[in-house]
Amino acid sequence: MFKKLFLFFIFTITTVLTGCKPLTILDPKGPQAARQADDIMLTLWIMLLIVITVFAILVYMLIKYRASKQPKDYEPPHIEGSPLVETLCVGIPVLIIVFLSIVSVRSNYIVEATPKGYEDQEPLVIYASSSNWKWHFSYPEQGIETVNYLYIPTDRALEFKLYSHGPITSFWIPQLGGQKYAMSDMITTLHLAADVPGEYSGRNANFSGKGFAENTFYVKAMSQAEFDQWVDDVKETAEPLTEEKFNELLKPGHLGQMTFTGTHLEFLPPPTAENGGHNHQSSANLQHEEESDHMDGSHH
């Protein structure tokens, strides 16, 4: 009976898993994401081993100590506790926690550094800033800026400088690496790399208001030659980004994909890490504050 149930359980799990589409976090396309996927799978295998062991012990106990035809006045013999069993029950969980802690700390240092194999390479620096509910990608080296989409070269280190023009958000491209917060008063740095050309999805992973669900962006990884050609095309066809236009983009709402020459970094610098960040409110926000002060009868 138990053998048939066990075989049915294995058959069901195997059938379901073979028909599932792989989760994006378990389909990495970069070294940072690969490291995190390996850690997730290691944790899952450990948990699976624990679950199988516990259920095996449960079945054994149910069979061994099931109700028997002993007389009603039967008293089982007195059994002392087993030091070995108690040691195993306490020691094994402690060892598992210590092991996973070591793995987590090591992985944290690895994913926070330049991706392995790209240490001697000059990274492509991209300033990724968020506003309700859009993503702005500034390429200072190339002198261009995009909204809600990101083009990156493969086989090159990527260094994202993250910050927000409003509430705290979270920059996340699941197939390239883990999420990292973008805040209004400081810059956080995220190191990524794409090993495989393709199209990926990115999003804000931190709730930031009613438009949070659509706060997504499109990512395309391509060869360096294709990336350079795209940059040249943008410089020839895109309109320049003015301060007035950028202030319009910062107003709450959703937009499609947009492309500009120049970046908002020229007239609205990001917070600096050296002095803990400075106030980089848009002129639209400043105007709103001035109007509020005027209504209150206050003066500067």
Image (spheres, rainbow, N blue to C red):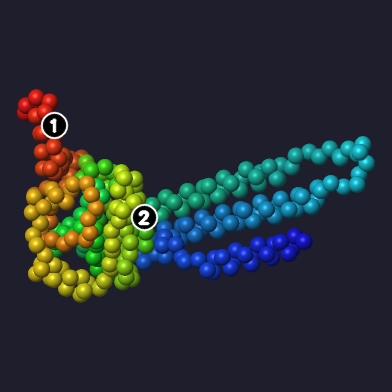
Name the amino acid type tagged 2.
Gly
Q: Is residue 227 above or below residue 270?
A: below
Q: Position of residue 92 (x, y in %)?
A: 61, 48
Q: At which x and y percent is residue 56?
A: 70, 55
Residue 267 in percent (x, y) is at: 8, 49
Residue at the left extreme of this rendering: 300
Where is mark 2, residue-wise? Answer: 178
Count the numbered circles shown.
2
**Upstream in sequence: badge 2 or badge 1:** 2
Q: Which residue is mark 1?
A: 292
What is the crowding at mark 2: few (fewer than 14 residues within 10 Å), some, or many (at least 20)? many
Q: Is residue 47 left or right of residue 130?
A: right
Identify the residue shown where x is 33% and y is 64%.
200
Quadrant housing the N terminus: bottom right
* Tag 1 secondary structure: helix
Quadrant into which the C terminus falls: top left
**Who's the residue at 86% across and 40% down the image?**
76
**Amino acid identity at mark 1:** Ser
In what element is the residue under mark 2?
Answer: loop
